[in-house]
Amino acid sequence: MFKKILIANRAEIACRIIRTCKELGISTVAVFSDSDMDSPAVKMADESVYLGASAAAESYLSQQKIIQAALTTGADALHPGYGFLSENANFASSLQNTGITFIGPDPESIAAMGDKIESKKIAQEAKVNTVPGHLGVVDTAENAIEISRDIGFPVMIKASAGGGGKGMRIAYAESEVSDCFRLAVNEAKTSFDDDRIFIEKYIEQPRHIEIQILADNFGNVVHLGERECSIQRRHQKVIEEAPSVALDSETRDAMGKQACDLAKAVKYRSAGTVEFIVDQYGKFYFLEMNTRLQVEHPVTEMVTGLDLVELMIRVASGEKLSFTQDDVMINGWAIESRVYAEDPKRNFLPSIGRLTHYKPPEEKEGSVRIDSGVMEGSEISIFYDPMISKLITYGEDRKEAIDRMKSALDKYYIRGTANNASFLAAVISHTKFLEGQLSTNFISDEFPDGFMSVQPISEVKNRIIAATVLMYMRIKNRQENVINRFDSFCIRENQEFVVSMNNELTEVRVTSGQDNKILIGKDTEIEIISNWKIGDVLLVACISGKTYTFQIDRKNPGYVITHGGIELEIRVFSRRAAALLSVMPEKIALDKSKSLISPMPGLLVSISVESGDKVRTGEELAIVEAMKMENILYSSSDGTVKRVLAAPGDSLAVDQVILEFE
């Protein structure tokens, strides 16, 4: 067994690997950039080494710096995590030459499977089902158009060295191919230093299902079942679960066998994932093989009881797998939600800034797990993936896992940056998700206009009103210095209010202070019991015998209540004040139609126009890069450029004006 392992990564995956190393009694070395100097991973590790500036190319992608760090600290092995250099065959080979063990597959296997073009050729030879497409490098946009015509639209334009949704674009028509090709090339070069592109048929309404495999140095290969990863945005996974409701035992065995056959074909060792897409008729096709640990590996760990990081370490140290395929058991159900610093209301654009408040739900062994690499005060920077954490819940069945996820998301209080926790809660509460009707188009189909919070059904609405009134009364009582008039946690009775929610007014009356009973409207009485104290950001209440959690934010003169994927601004009025609302003037929004505004914080890569230029609707104006993703900003109407206010290379804030029109 190894004595010291260097983790060539950052954030939650670095913390995850360190935890297993500590359990195995192995010393750890963390590496860090300027942005990660005070990160939890650095604090957890036994040693740490500074790599350089925040830009990945100067830190986590610098092979020379990382290898030198391993040599300097005397590490006898290195775990790459995922992303960065985890699937770089040259890095693995260079590391081998120093005598340091790479905890992952051999360089030859990485090269064979990391190249999406070559991997498909190998898969075909191994009799693995593959997606129709052009198995060759596409050199130009013109060539891409010609190939796309031959394949038939829609097509997927992909980076050969890609992964994580980077360098991947869908073209639904010939007119879209040139832009998609250019963006895929640029993202591939930036993210992987490899701009080779290939094109394949895009399977519509697919499910994304992957098989976790594990292999040792003695020819033993097993699979650990499947993960459903169909809930995606921008081709990046958001919610994963194990197992999948879509697979019967026959399909599961067939997919597992093909995954193992592919691993044997390239003499694979370590943990790896073979990804498939499954069409609406149940046919499955090989997509790619990830020669590393996956972000979503915790759901497999929860249903198998196996520690994949530990198994990777043991295999790399020369140990034989201690179990066979017949020993692998899938028990229960697990769901993972990726909590991102992004704004679902702005098309999931990344959000940077400091986590001013970070209060995750309590971890419970066997039911609630949080893999996080941040803490209160951590900075979410422009340089890396905006993931805050992974929230994983387990249940005896899918319903129990979902119910626990709903509860955990309600308790996840994050402020300082926008985040997607409410959106995640809305997805897992969606009827089609509950029924298991999933595809990679789920988000675009079910939230076509973006996510602007879910409108509550009457039962949920009444819960939120009751919680708000209870909170309001506690605050009002303190202001009036009414202390212990009844009981510490009671509401004064026989008071009447009007609650404004979504411009809808609801009359409310407190009917019993002793029993905390609130009459909503004319005939809905709710009993609510809570120990909430003024200043608490979470209000946990027992309503009709069930426990619910509400997130509380003051927004004068009202509140923002977050619960179950619903985020509402609520105000409480006296009857007299409510009667005056109708005569209040409406606030007029500022006209932004004469400006091109950056929709996200990012780097201005290019500007395609100058002052005085005439532009037409749909014409490219600028490209903004954020978290390694390039975004083209187009003109929404015909016009003339009045002046350009930013230059390529500038760091842009969200809503910053790039140029103005006459």
Image (cartoon, helix red, strand yellow):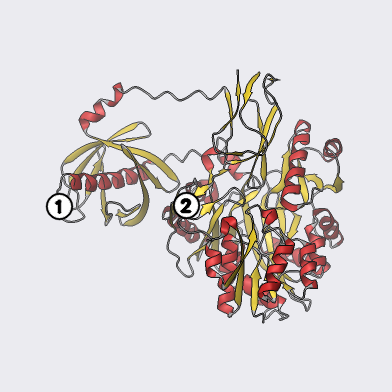
Q: Earlier in the sequence, mark 1 or mark 2?
A: 2
Q: Position of residue 562 (x, y in %)?
A: 40, 46
Q: Quadrant of residue 530?
A: bottom left
Residue 31 visible in this rendered orientation of the protein: yes
Return the residue nearer the eye: 514 or 390.
390
Taking 551 as reference, is 61 left or right? right
Crowding at dot 2, Cα within 10 Å, few <14 / some 14-19 / many 20+, comes out as many
Q: Position of residue 373 (x, y in %)?
A: 54, 61
Q: Amino acid at mark 1?
A: Ile
Q: Quadrant of residue 531?
A: bottom left
Of labels 1 and 2, the one closer to you: 2
Return the residue nearer the eye: 55 or 155.
55
The local secondary structure at tag 2 comes to loop
Taking 644 as reference, is 432 left or right? left
The local secondary structure at tag 1 comes to loop
Q: Which mark is residue 193?
A: none
Q: Position of residue 560 (x, y in %)?
A: 37, 42
Write the residue at 47% across / 61% down. 400
Residue 271 visible in this rendered orientation of the protein: no
Write the residue at 62% across / 50% down. 383
Write the residue at 76% across / 56% down. 286
Taking 556 as reference, is 161 left or right? right
Q: Is residue 458 above or below residue 541?
A: above
Q: Is residue 536 above or below residue 257?
A: above
Q: Which mark is residue 483?
A: 1
Q: Amino acid at mark 2?
A: Leu
Residue sitting farthest toward the left = 485
Q: Which mark is residue 355?
A: 2
Q: Position of residue 47 (x, y in %)?
A: 58, 72
